Amino acid sequence: MKFIDIIEILGTIAFAFSGAYSAMQKRLDVFGVLIITFVTAIGGGTIRDLLIGSLPVAWILDLQIITTILTTYVVALFFLPKLMRLSKLLFWFDTIGLAVFCAVAIDKGISFHLHPIVCIALGTVTGCFGGILRDVILNEIPYIFRKDIYASACIAGGIVYFLCLYIGIDNGTTGWIAGITIGLIRVCAYYFKWRLPLIYVKG
């Protein structure tokens, strides 16, 4: 198994836990939790592969992804109910999944010889899409549309990715640096209350 595949599995696990946790908060039944877990975990990777024409999409070709999601789901059923009072749990799962999927998508965009700006956009969409699907299905306003630092963290991480490549750092290390950058921005934004300006119209 390639190193990039291991990293993507870690991101899949993180987003699967994120989906399961959100579904349990909404008090869905076991089947509902499974659907939200699956959709959250494969949503970003699916839109990534569709956008770049990498078909069939990764999870259809790789049974290990499905096995990973199902295993995560079973673990979540036993352990997450005991951790439901930990309000920061969703934030950490979401942050890990966001960072990993964004970095992996940028790397895949590069392998398809896409322009750096397109790669950054691809990474941002990939990192955010699973969470968007999760929140929309659960009738929540998606994180990406709130005042939280989310998509902008992916953009910053993508810029760091290409800056690292420009100065000669290898792809593997660059992916780690970009992912850590995304995670640090999210964590700092959470603890220091960084917010994007809100736009609203009185009326």
Image: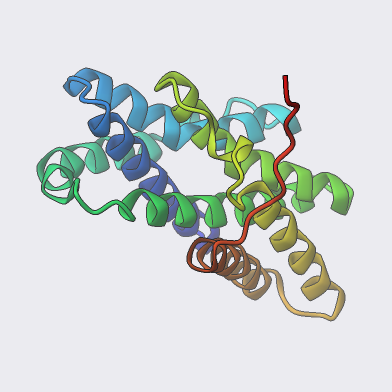
Left or right relative to 58: residue 67? left
At x 46%, y 26%, the residue is 140
Residue at 44% in and 20% down: 139
The image position of residue 21, as x and y in percent, is 28, 39
30 versus 67 height, above or below: above
Residue drawn at x 66%, y 57% is 153
- Give residue 80's position: percent from left, percent from top: 18, 45
Q: Is residue 71 above or below residue 9?
A: above
The N terminus appears in which quarter of the rendering? bottom left
Q: Quadrant of residue 92?
A: bottom left
Q: Is 140 rendered above or below residue 103?
A: above
Can residue 1 be seen by looking at this rendering?
A: no
Q: Quadrant of the C terminus?
A: top right
Q: Nearer the viewer, residue 187 or 104?
A: 187
- Residue 185 visible? The answer is yes
Q: How many marks?
A: 0
Q: As displayed, is residue 1 above or below residue 50? A: below
Q: Is residue 14 or residue 168 the one in the foreground?
A: 14
Q: Position of residue 15 (x, y in %)?
A: 41, 44
Q: Quadrant of residue 73?
A: top left
Display colour scheme = rainbow
Q: Nearer the viewer, residue 183 or 170?
A: 183
Q: Position of residue 191 (x, y in %)?
A: 48, 67
Residue lying at 45% horizontally and 49% vertically, measured from the top left: 94
Q: Residue furthest front?
A: 203
